[in-house]
Image (tube, rainbow, N blue to C red):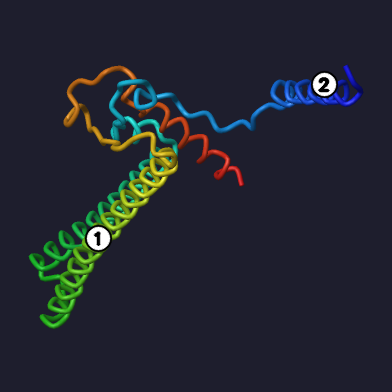
Amino acid sequence: MNKVQIAINVILVAAVAALFVIIFAVKPTAKPEVAVAPAAQEGALPVAFVNLDSILQGYTFALEAQDKLMTRQENARLELNQKARTLQNEMADFQRKLENNAFLSRQRAESEQQRILKKQQDLEEREAQLTQEIMLENQQLQAQLADTILSFLKELNAEGRYQMIFSNNAKDNILLSAEGYDITAEVVSALNARYMPAKKK
């Protein structure tokens, strides 16, 4: 065996050894864990679904937003009830004075009546205003939640694992499915994981 052949063999052995070192020593970069769904399995349909009711009951942001909205509604109700009681007392007082001829003049009685009617009108306008504000706040919350969930699902499906992701409400749309097609738990867990660090900032 000549020197050239020996040199080639040494180079080949070194190259094979280097290849083994590269394959077994270098670890692949870790990707975020995503649940393996049936779509990734052989012969399964590339679809999944999420239960929106469960997301709203498990997503921390949704729960906090709902609590905030409930507090807003309660505060509005207390404000309106307090003003309504005050107005009712003033109306009763006016009626009593009117029946007892307690007003010094007819003009004074009419002025008081107009004041009470204006207060009643203001209360009705305030009730309409609060109702409108709460309804708008609720619509904005629903839109924000829908956008957050849709954005996350697009991110989750960035590699095109699913052809469709359905929404389900209390089994309205999907009555029965094979195990694994429901990705609600994974979605809730990931949404909460993203929300909590953002909240701590």
Residue picked out by circle 2 = 9
Q: Position of residue 132 (x, y in %)?
A: 25, 60
Q: Determine whether, in the image, residue 6 is placed left or right of residue 43.
A: right
> Which residue is outermost to the left?
99
Give the amino acid at mark 2.
Asn
Q: Earlier in the sequence, mark 2 or mark 1?
A: 2
**Who's the residue at 13% across and 62% down the image?**
96
Q: Position of residue 120 (x, y in %)?
A: 18, 66
The Cα–Cα distance between marks 2 and 1, rounded to whole angstroms, is 84 Å
Give the amino acid at mark 1.
Gln
Indicate the secondary structure of the residue bearing disc 2: helix
Residue picked out by circle 1 = 132
For residue 171, what is the image quadrant?
Answer: top left
Q: Determine whether, in the image, residue 153 is placed left or right of residue 82.
A: right
Q: Position of residue 48 (x, y in %)?
A: 31, 30
**Who's the residue at 23% across and 54% down the image?**
85
- The relative height of residue 53 versus residue 175 in the rendered view (above or below) is below
For residue 30, what is the image quadrant?
Answer: top right
Q: Determine whether, in the image, residue 61 is placed left or right of residue 109.
A: right
**Who's the residue at 46% across and 30% down the image?**
189
